[in-house]
Amino acid sequence: MEQVANIFGSHALRRFDYAAATRAGPPALAQLDEDVLAAIDQHGFAVIEHAVPAASCDRVVAEMRPFLDATPHGLHGLGGTRRSGALVARSPASHEMIAHPAILQLVKSILGEQRLSGDAVHINGRSAKGEKGFRYPWHLHLTQVIDVGPGGGSEAMPHQLKMHRANGMWMHDFQDAALDPQLEVMWALTDFSAVNGATHVVLGSHREEPRGGTRSHREPTVQAVMPQGSALIWTGWAVHGAGVNASAERRIGMNINYALGFLVQEENQYLACPPHLARRLPVQMQRLIGYRQPAGALNYVAECQAPADSVLREDFDVLVPGAHGHAMDASIDGPAFAPTDEDAFQRKLERLASRKAQAIADDDLELALHLKNAISVLKRSPRL
Ligand SMILES: O=C(O)CCC(=O)C(=O)O
């Protein structure tokens, strides 16, 4: 555990062992979730070691190898570095990390429920910590392998991206908003060492006043040295920066970030994984990358359909009139259309209502909202 004293007090980069907690069983895993959250709240950063097996990291690197090898060094302002994204589409092995349960639990706590000190969920005039029915939606924001070669970040191959806060990217200035808009994760796909350029972090910098200040950029850093298969996690308010690779090896990290579902994504996930590829993904991954309606009137397609009821359907073609698939009601829509079958209509309403009740019981409020909208659309315009 690396300690540092700086203008934010005395801080530590705390480490947790996911493999050990998994062996110890569910209570230990639940405790790990709480402890990592508390460490991030207190210090801005935490490391989960052995979060995935080394072999999973090797598989991601192998899947991304053709894309990395075809990418010039130095794009995006990090000298000596290759960056390559679109991991959901290109690297099936990355899904284990993108949807890692411990990470998704943190995303739910920090973004969905705004559990960190000073933050709150603000909806319709009410501010509180999140709870069932009063949570923000979130989605995947960035997937990027950061492959730093020998000399990367040195004077000969300088980084333009010095110490920084990820929340500097939003056009809106969120620093007075009592809000954590994004959470970042750096996966060590190879060992991260002090020599090969492990990420530098300024512990406690997420508490700088004002939140977007720059005093922290001059404070002493700690390097997030960690074995392959570990994850360094930090809030978008915490100051960090890439190290210099003074070794003869490549330091390969994978930056996976999450953000609130009503903010635009850093890497456009629907374009990076277009519908013909997204259709083959598990539903959880489809929804994580944004093929969903995070709230009633956000992110629908064409005739107000959820992505799952439109672009993700094999037979959907946005240029085909009636591609929404709802039958027409001759009495309302005109004589050219076949009459509705009232029994079938009632059966469909009942099916939707029962799925909605199940979604509420499962605490899947997004699905429940979607079904509520589907029922109301169906009732307003009786189509099959
Ligand atoms: O590669 C790293 O260690 C950090 C990169 C980084 O800070 C960034 O891309 O924002």
Image: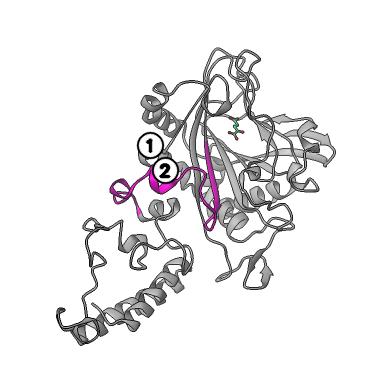
Q: Please state the quadrant of the image where ligand 1 appears.
A: top right
The image quarter in which residue 95 lies: top left
In front here: 21 or 270?
270
Which residue position holds label 2? 95
In front here: 25 or 111?
111
Colour setting: one colour
Residue 336 horizontal side relative to residue 384, left or right = left
Quick one: quadrant of the C terminus?
bottom left
Amino acid of disc 2: His
Cα separation between marks 2 and 1: 7 Å
Asked if marks 2 and 1 touch (Cβ < 8 Å), the reply is yes
Which residue position holds label 1? 91
Tell me, yes or no, whether the highlighted magenta stretch contains residue 277.
yes
The image quarter in which residue 362 lies: bottom left
Callout 1 crowding tier (Cα within 10 Å): few <14, some 14–19, many ≥20: some
Please report the residue visible at 30 percent of the width from the left and 46 percent of the height from the top.
277
Please report the residue visible at 44 percent of the width from the left and 53 percent of the height from the top.
288
Q: Position of residue 204 (x, y in %)?
A: 76, 42
Secondary structure under badge 2? helix
- The relative height of residue 263 versus residue 216 in the rendered view (above or below) is below
- The relative height of residue 188 versus residue 127 in the rendered view (above or below) is above
Label 2 CB, ligand 1: below 8 Å? no
Q: How many numbered discs? A: 2
- The relative height of residue 277 versus residue 261 in the rendered view (above or below) is above
Please report the residue visible at 68 percent of the width from the left and 36 percent of the height from the top.
164
Question: Which residues fall within the magenta stretch?
Answer: 255-282
Secondary structure under badge 1? loop
Q: Position of residue 373 (x, y in %)?
A: 40, 74
